[in-house]
Amino acid sequence: MNEEKDMADARTILAGYRASIDNIDAALIHMLAERFRCTKAVGVLKAKHGLPPADPAREQQQIARLRQLADDAHLDPDFAEKFLNFVVREVIRHHEQIAAANGVTKTG
């Protein structure tokens, strides 16, 4: 009987964790959507002024900043960097599409 109660308690706790995870996942998606709305505006501005889609110096600054934030938050900085690199690659792809649609070449 005690084992059944322990299992029921564990399932209740698990359900609470899963609800929190689901909420966090939803927040992450909304935050990414907002981030991409902002980076789309950056891409339009860059294309309008003939600026290149990628900014390696800015990317390096962001990597260093996010690695430090990750470390401060007790998150693996390597994971944070991989995640940022994934997002930045997608942003650059969008910027290249925006630039091409506006007649700007990849070299500016």
Image (cartoon, rainbow, N blue to C red):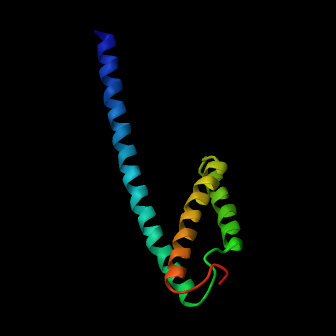
Whether residue 42 is visible to the viewer of this picture, yes or no, is no
Q: Where is residue 102 drawn, in percent x and y? A: 51, 86
Residue 5 versus residue 55: which sits nearer the camera? 55
- Nearest to the observer: residue 23 or residue 43: 43
Residue occupying image coordinates x 69% and y 68%: 61
Task: Determine which quarter of the picture holds residue 86.
Answer: bottom right
Front residue of this view, candidates 63 and 65: 63
Q: Tell me what residue is drawn at x 55 percent, y 85 percent.
A: 47
- Residue 11 placement, left or right of 57: left
Q: Residue at x 70, y 62 (%)?
A: 64
Question: Quadrant location of the C terminus?
Answer: bottom right
Q: Is residue 37 left or right of residue 71?
A: left
Give the quadrant of residue 15: top left
Q: Which residue occupies 32% across, 24% down?
A: 9
Q: Position of residue 10 (x, y in %)?
A: 36, 25
Tally of numbered tags: 0
